[in-house]
Image (cartoon, helix red, strand yellow):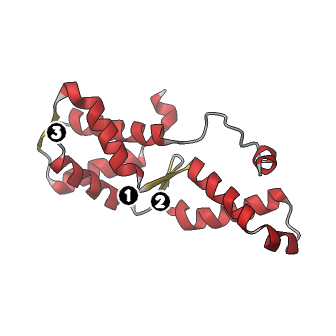
Amino acid sequence: METIKESQGMKSSGRGTSFETVKLLAQSVVRRLESQKMIAIIREQRSDLVDDLARHLASHILTQEDMEKNVLESIGEKNEMLDELRLSGGEAYRTLKQTWLSRYGENEVDGLYFQEPVKYTADRVISYLMKSPFVDEVFGEDLVLERTIVSTIAGFRRAKLH
């Protein structure tokens, strides 16, 4: 298995995504809402809010690592069938990756694969903010909050944050 990963140039290069990327996304959303005065937060608990929101979102967002792990596991499970099709390791990887992307790639933002339309994720964030002990007040109307969150997610780029 590792040889397929290596042959695809996918050694851990730090370019993949992880929970840390979901956390950066959560941080971007919180900052944007706070700077636009749509929410009031307890400043001392900002990092707790970001961590908690990221955990809340993580189960609805797949990462690049999730995709690679799933594709490599699929190759292992389908080895016999792949042998019959006479696909090389690289061809098998590309084929299974394309299948995975056709299933999850529609709602992809910078290596994060949302398992539902981003609008629904925004609704989850709003619901979370209404109940969060780390948020003092939510000032924005739902539609304005939703648009702001969707636009923040759509414009999210890790490269801009470094």
Q: CA distance from mark 1 to mark 3?
A: 22 Å
Residue 14 locus on image (x, y percent): 61, 33
Label 2's element? Answer: helix
> Please, what is the three-letter code of the amino acid marked with disc 1?
Val
Q: Residues within 10 Å of mark 1 (few under 14, many from 20)?
A: many
Label 1's element? Answer: helix
Q: Which mark is residue 107?
A: 2
Give the number of marks: 3
Q: CA distance from mark 2 to mark 1?
A: 7 Å
Classify residue 9 as left or right of residue 32: right
Work out whether 162 lies above or below 60.
above
Q: What residue did someone put label 3 on? A: 135
Choose between 149 and 131: the one closer to the eye.
Answer: 131
> Please, what is the three-letter code of the amino acid marked with disc 3?
Val
Q: What residue did someone put label 1 on? A: 118
Q: CA distance from mark 2 to mark 3?
A: 28 Å
Which residue is pictured at 81% across the width and 47% down the height?
Answer: 3
